[in-house]
Image (spheres, rainbow, N blue to C red):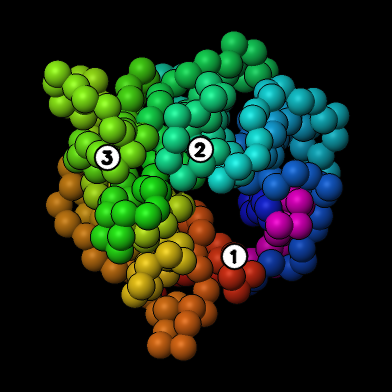
Amino acid sequence: GNLLVSSTSSGKIYALPDKDGDGKADETITVLEGLNSPHGLALKCPDPAETCGLYVAEADKVTLYEYSPGSYTAASARKIVDLDSGGRHHTVTLLYGPPGYDDKLIIASGSSCDVCHEEDWRRAKILMANGDGSDLKEFAKGLRNAVFLAIHPVTGKIWVTEMGRDNLGDDLPPDEINIIEEGKNYGWPNCYGKNIHDTDFDKNTYIRNPCTEPFETESYIDIPAHSAPLGLAFIPEEGWPEEYWHNLLVAYHGSWNRSTPTGYKIVRFKLDPQGNFIGVEDFISGWLTKNGALGRPVDILTQPGGTIYISDDKAGVIYKVALKG
């Protein structure tokens, strides 16, 4: 029942208990510190859970801890995966045990550059390993920086947000939402969006269009360029109006490289129960003002009963959003 939060800049993992149930954290408890840009967290908890396995992704590795929820302590650190670090993107995201992959650890690792051919096979991909870190291998590739992952509640498929490259102007390339399937190539660095060939980078001559199925997989949904989509979360049924069931919320962290700023909001993607795209609208906005940005939303956690938690790495806070009624 406690929130676990990673702070990349401070190198810490915090626990935020709300023992009195008033909707505010009672205190900020440091669980781990001295870490190398920790980002992704995943829990492997038995039932009942006196001790859980806590996976922590740092820039250069994944470590498995024995985590005691009752005392907010993590011990017996064991490095289980080595990763390449340095370069453009240092955040690594984790997902444990998605449908069809019991006791598997999914690891999203971003690119070392804006646009390039990677030298290390682990970069710009989603990787998969056993729960103990063994048998690390490629799960999907061609993903420049798939920073967050979520499981669709009906289909069980993995959805990710992906940020496109820079230096093609204000409106190109689009950022993306993708549905990930094992073995597929999602285009980067040669293709973007709806299988558009990035001829600014890829100067090779082809006898066929290199950006076509089944060689490359186009984006599922295009997002305005430089929105910087990060956290994504599906809205559950319990405690939510039916019109929101299985819709997708996405945090637009906001642009740093666009002549007119864009993003800085939470967006609702309307979907049918199978995940087919119906439409899009702003869900929460107001962070971007004429005087600059008040905050930059990062991750989203939706819960039954109409509750949402949103992290903000500019304001340095976590918001709790609750439905009225």
Residues at marks 3 and 2 touching, judged by CB atoms closer than 8 Å:
no
Q: Which of marks 3 and 1 is nearer the N terminus?
A: 3
**Residue type for callout 1:** Asp
Q: How crowded is mark 2: few (under 14 residues within 10 Å), some or many (20 or more)?
A: many
User: Which image quadrant is residue 241 in?
Assistant: bottom left
Residue at 52% x, 74% y is 295
Counting from the top left corner in percent of width and height, residue 228 is at 41, 57
Which residues fall within the magenta stretch? Answer: 9-21
Q: Nearer the viewer, residue 207 or 57?
A: 207
Give the secondary structure at mark 3: loop
Direction from residue 96 to residue 208 in the image, left or right? left
Q: Nearer the viewer, mark 3 or mark 1?
A: 3
Residue at 67% x, 18% y is 132
**Image vertical order of residue 193 relative to residue 16, above or below:** above
Q: How crowded is mark 3: few (under 14 residues within 10 Å), some or many (20 or more)?
A: some
In this figure, which residue is indicated by the disc labeled 1? 313
**Residue type for callout 2:** Ser
Mark 2 and mark 1: span between their CA atoms? 21 Å
Q: In this rendering, does residue 63 appear at all?
A: yes
In this figure, which residue is indicated by the disc labeled 2? 111
Counting from the top left corner in percent of width and height, residue 263 is at 37, 67
In this figure, which residue is indicated by the disc labeled 3? 198
Residues at marks 2 and 1 touching, judged by CB atoms closer than 8 Å:
no
Mark 3 and mark 2: span between their CA atoms? 17 Å
Residue at 46% x, 88% y is 291
Residue at 30% x, 60% y is 169
